[in-house]
Image: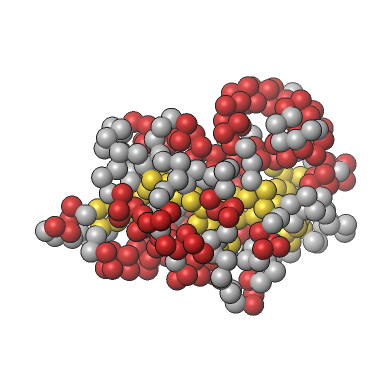
Amino acid sequence: MLNRRTLLAATAGTVALPSLVGAQAANTLKITGWGGRWGEIMRDELIPAFERENRCRVEVDTAFPFVPKLLASPRGRPVYDVLHTNSNEQWDVYARGLVEKRPDLSKIPNAAAIYPYATSDDIVGVVFLTSAVGLAYRRDKVQQPPVSWKDLWDARFSGNRGSYLIPANSLGQMLFMMAGKLYGSGYRDLNAAFAAMERLRPVRLFDFTGGIENAMLSGELNVGVLHDTAVYRNQDRVPVEFVSPTEGVFALEQVLSICKGTQMTELANTWINYMLSPTVQMRMSTEVWYSPVRRDMQLPDRFRGKLLTTPEQVASLIQFPWEWYNQNKDRIDDRVNRIFRG
């Protein structure tokens, strides 16, 4: 997920772009994308520039969810050429044989300038932007700010803390895996994570990041799991702060993968290369507060110390074993549903 808040803000459907004629009409790249401010920049600026440069047409589907549509399309004629989604879903479609594990990076020159985490073994495809997921808190209500992920379990936040419905939201799933490490032997320690979820009650759970973001902004919650983008975009008008816990921040990666069976591999590689270009990285980072993956980005002063642009900051990102999680998701969903219904 870019995040589910943005998805709710999206205008459903496929973005209609000006038709091209002749040979150009057949040179069409089908991709997925988000709405909101993200979608506006893509539609009004970045996609038209790409179309002009490459004499092509780009069709963007913003009607989430994307995976069922990709599953239903013919293997030799996929509904998308490039899939943009988050790591949990990328691993899901890779396991189903629907996307390539990694594009040919030799055909993507800008990949030489990105941080290693963007193509780590924990990633299917290539990361092109990232949010840091940490703890948000209201400075007008919390005298002692949280510093550790364990502080979310502190009794002083009982009933005034927020997280996510684990079956529905990858941020909730990341917190679940983190609980296994905090209170057990590691991210895959299911028993420790289940026990931690029991102790987290009472907690308000949300389907989408938009729900917890609005609850933080309105003062309904004192502390909650949230990505940095949502906090920094609103910090000038509400007393909300973002904390990077001492154990690290969860990586909410925006990932591009090439769909198997596409007839547009060359153009797909060109699109990914474009998304990794300094121009696109700078524009998206400064407009929607997402951390770039290029090592050479120098952002304006207001973004420094917030977005992750240095090796030290990038080292705080935690990537999770999504392949393992997806294999155990049904078991986890069944148990946490019973925990939070109790």
Q: Where is residue 170 in the image (x, y as percent from the top left)?
A: 60, 40
How is the structure coloured here?
secondary structure
Work out whether residue 13 or residue 257 is closer to the camera in this orientation and state it. 257
The quarter of the displayed image where residue 165 is located: top right
Q: Residue at x 57, y 34 (%)?
A: 323
Q: Residue at x 51, y 70 (%)?
A: 282
Q: Position of residue 248 (x, y in %)?
A: 74, 52
The quarter of the displayed image where residue 141 is located: bottom right
Does residue 115 appear left or right of residue 51 in this picture? right
Residue located farthest toward the left when viewing the structure as drawn: 22
Q: Where is residue 21 in the image (x, y as percent from the top left)?
A: 14, 60
Does residue 257 appear left or right of residue 248 in this picture? left
Q: Which residue is drawn at 65% across and 26% down?
A: 332
Residue located farthest toward the front when viewing the structure as drawn: 106
Q: Where is residue 272 in the image (x, y as percent from the top left)?
A: 40, 56
State whether residue 194 appears in this view. Answer: no
Residue 335 vertical position relative to residue 150 in the rendered view, above or below: above
Q: Residue at x 45, y 35 (%)?
A: 93
Residue 172 vertical position relative to residue 251 in the rendered view, above or below: above
State whether residue 248 appears in this view. Answer: yes
Work out whether residue 290 or residue 124 is closer to the camera in this orientation and state it. 124
Work out whether residue 12 or residue 100 is closer to the camera in this orientation and state it. 100
Give the quadrant of the C terminus: top right
Q: Number of labelled discs?
A: 0
Residue 271 vertical position relative to residue 338 in the rendered view, above or below: below
Residue located farthest toward the bottom when viewing the structure as drawn: 301
